[in-house]
Amino acid sequence: MSFRDKFKTNEEYNKYFRNYREKNREKIRIYNREYNKQWREKNGYHNEHKWTDKNPEKIKAQRLAQYALRNGYIERKSCKECGNKKSEMHHSDYTKPLNVIFLCRIHHTEEHRKLSPHKSNILR
């Protein structure tokens, strides 16, 4: 008999865990903090921040382009290669933040691989 089988209904099960979380809030908070810390270390959370620290000009260009797109200064287009409406912005030159081409995820990845063939996973 599993732990879940002790409860006749989902409502009983949910009520039990709501009550448990209320009574053990601090214990759960400490556990979650430690778990999340280990997860970030294992999954490269800090490496991403190192990249942003090393590439401020790229971050600035991306943010300016996102701002322009959100506020209507530039219009989202379909992928230049295949016409897919789900497209991403690609900067050929980060000194020109509003000069972007729109590519789908596949063609965007291919474009970065052409530029940096030694890097297999250029997109986050």
Image (tube, rainbow, N blue to C red):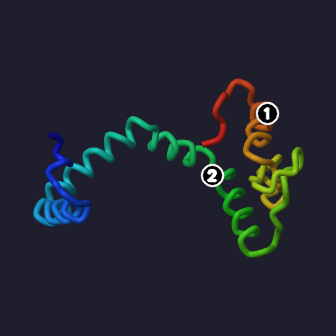
Q: For the residue marked with disc 2, what is the amino acid?
A: Pro
Marking on residue 37: none
Is residue 98 or residue 79 the one in the foreground? 79
Left or right of 13: which side holds 49?
A: right
Q: Residue furthest left?
A: 23
Within 10 Å of disc 2 (Cα), the crowding (few <14, some 14-19, many 20+) is few
Q: Which residue is mark 1?
A: 115
User: x%, y% of residue 31?
Assistant: 21, 49
Give the distance between the C-alpha atoms of the residues marked 1 and 2, in whole angstroms. 19 Å
Q: Position of residue 119 (x, y in %)?
A: 67, 28
Look at the numbered disc 2 and give the secondary structure of its residue: helix
The residue tagged 2 is 56
Amino acid beneath label 1 = Leu
Near-viewer residue (112 or 15): 15
- Asked whether, in this view, residue 3 is left or right of residue 117, the answer is left
Residue at 19% x, 65% y: name it: 15
Residue lying at 50% horizontally and 47% vertically, measured from the top left: 49
Could you tell me residue 38's position as x and y percent?
32, 40
Quadrant in the picture for residue 97: bottom right
